Amino acid sequence: MRNMSFALTTAQVRAGTKTVTRRMGWTFLKPGDLVRPVVKSQGLKRGEKVEVIRVPLRILSVRREPLERLLLESRYGLMECVREGFRDDPVLCWPQDFVEFFCRTHASRPEDLVTRIEFEYT
């Protein structure tokens, strides 16, 4: 089973409020696959171990879409911010702020294609 890092959204996965994640890559996933949610899996210092957040996640759907879809379709963008686990976040609950956050943390642009991964908790 592959590890999937949630370093930036550990709290949302722990709380079970996140059911969608966006990634650069990860196009190989298929519905039904299981992944182990971890805090981080790469860049561990000597002696550090992978910290598992919770039980495996089951992948429900995988698709590629431009990140800017969250901006172009306002209702979709608001719903996706909730699915990303930011319903109660005063900043990241807004599509514009979420897209800026994503671009800053993933060295990407709004027009870039990202992989939208929907999952459920097992």
Image: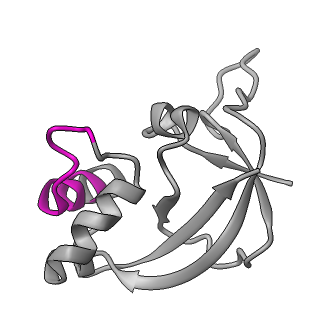
Give the image location of residue 57, x and y in percent. Answer: 72, 53
Q: Quadrant of the N terminus?
A: bottom right
Q: Residue at x 23, y 64 (%)?
A: 78
Residue in front for this viewpoint, 119 or 40: 119
Q: How is the image coloured?
A: one colour
Give the image location of residue 16, x and y in percent. Answer: 55, 41
87 relative to 67, above or below: above
Give the image location of residue 64, x and y in percent. Answer: 48, 84
Q: Residue at x 22, y 47 (%)?
A: 92
Looking at the rendering, which quadrant does residue 43 occupy? top right
Q: Residue at x 24, y 51 (%)?
A: 101
User: In the rendered structure, does residue 66 fall within the stretch colored magenta?
Assistant: no
Q: Residue at x 77, y 40 (%)?
A: 55
| Residue 79 appears left or right of 118 | left
Looking at the rendering, which quadrant does residue 67 occupy? bottom left
| Residue 18 appears left or right of 81 | right
Residue found at the very far right of the displayed protein: 1
Give the magenta-colored segment's residue range: 88-102
Q: How many marks?
A: 0
71 relative to 7, above or below: below
Give the image location of residue 105, x and y in percent. Answer: 32, 49
| Residue 31 appears left or right of 73 | right
Residue in front for this viewpoint, 31 or 39: 31
111 relative to 40, above or below: below
